[in-house]
Image: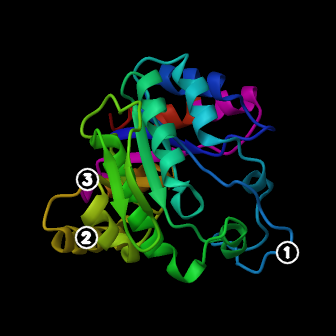
Amino acid sequence: MKFGVSTFITDQGIAPDALGRAVEERGFDSLLIAEHTHIPVDRRSPYPGGGDLPEMYYRTLDPFVALSAAAAVTERLLLGTGIALVAQRDPIVTAKEVASLDLVSGGRAVFGVGVGWNREEMENHGTDPTTRGRLVNERLGAMRELWTAEKAEFHGEFVDFDPVYSWPKPVRRPHPPIWVGGGEGAFGRVADFGDVWLANRTDPEQLGPQIERLREAAGREVPVTVYAAPDDPATIEGYEQIGVERLLLYLPTRPETESVEILDRLAAAADRFR
C-alpha cells in the first residue's frame, strides 16, 4: 500500500515549499491539498464534519500556486488537488492550470476533483447547486478535450466553445490522472472520468462493500485512495485487507515545527506497512 498526505495549506500553517520537501523526505508518494476560494459569512450549508466550520476552510491558498511552490523543491512527489471544486472553476482556465502544473513538475500533477458541499460558496461563482453534478461532468469532458486535442471544441448544456488552441499540453498522456472524490453518488463520475476513486474517510468495514459496488458499476478494477485517513495501525491494516491502493494520512494545519513533528509520527505509522 502507498501512503501520501492530505492537508489544508493556509497563510497560518507551514509554507508549501517546506511542506513539500518534508513530505517527500519522509517517503510519502503524494501530497493533496484542499481548495476553497472563500467562505460566505452568511452560510446555511452545514459543515459535513459537524459543528463549527474550522478556520482553515476560509484561509486556503490557491492550490495551483501552492503546488507549484512544492514542485520546485521536490523530485518524486505526486502533487494534487484534494479536491478542486470544479463546479466553481472555469474549465478553460483550469485545464491550463493543471497542464502547467504537470509541465513544471515534470509530469507529477494529479487532478483530484469533486462537486463541493457549500451551496452559498458555489452560488457566488454563478453556479446553481441543483445542477452542479451535470456541470462538473461537462467541465471534465471539456478539459479532457483541451488536454488531448490540437483543436479542441466542446458543445454541451453548460460548456460551449468552438475550436480553440490551448497549450501547454500535459506531460503525462493522455492527461494527468483524475481522482474523483465523493461517496456512492459519485460512482457514475468515477466510471466516466476517474482513474482513481478518492474515497472519503470511511471505516474499512463500510468501505469494502462500497468498493465492490463501484467496480461493478464501472466494469473495471478502479484503484481506491482514501482521503484524510487516520494513522491508527488497526485502521490502516483494515484498509490494506480490503485492497485500498493508497492512504492519504491527514496532516492538521499547523506551523512548520509542529507540522514536521506530526509528519514524523505519520511516517512512522506508514513505515509499518510499506
Q: Evaluate if marks 2 and 3 touch, with contact meaning CB atoms under 8 Å apart.
A: no
The residue beneath circle 3 is 223
Residue 149 % position (x, y): 27, 43
Q: Is residue 126 above or below residue 153?
A: below
Residue drawn 57% across and 67% down?
Answer: 116
Outermost residue, right side: 41
Query: Mark 2 falls on what kind of element?
Result: helix
Which residue is at the front of the view, 252 or 80? 80
Outermost residue, front side: 162
Quarter of the image where the C terminus is located: top left
Q: Splitting the image into 4 quarters, where does residue 70 fall?
A: top right
Res 42 label: 1
Query: Mark 3 falls on what kind of element?
Result: loop
Q: Residue type at mark 2?
A: Leu
Q: Splitting the image into 4 quarters, where does residue 222 fall?
A: bottom left
- Work out whether mark 2 precedes mark 3 in sequence or the reverse, and give the earlier one: 2
CA gap, disc 1 and disc 2: 36 Å
Q: Evaluate if marks 1 and 2 touch, with contact meaning CB atoms under 8 Å apart.
A: no
In the image, residue 260 lies in the stretch drawn in magenta: yes
Which residue is at the front of the view, 120 or 269? 120
- Work out whether mark 1 precedes mark 2 in sequence or the reverse, and give the earlier one: 1
Query: Mark 1 falls on what kind of element?
Result: loop
Residues shaded magenta = 240-263
The residue beneath circle 2 is 214
Residue drawn 29% across and 48% down?
Answer: 245
Which residue is at the front of the view, 206 or 136? 136
Horizontal side of residue 151 vs 231, given as left or right: left
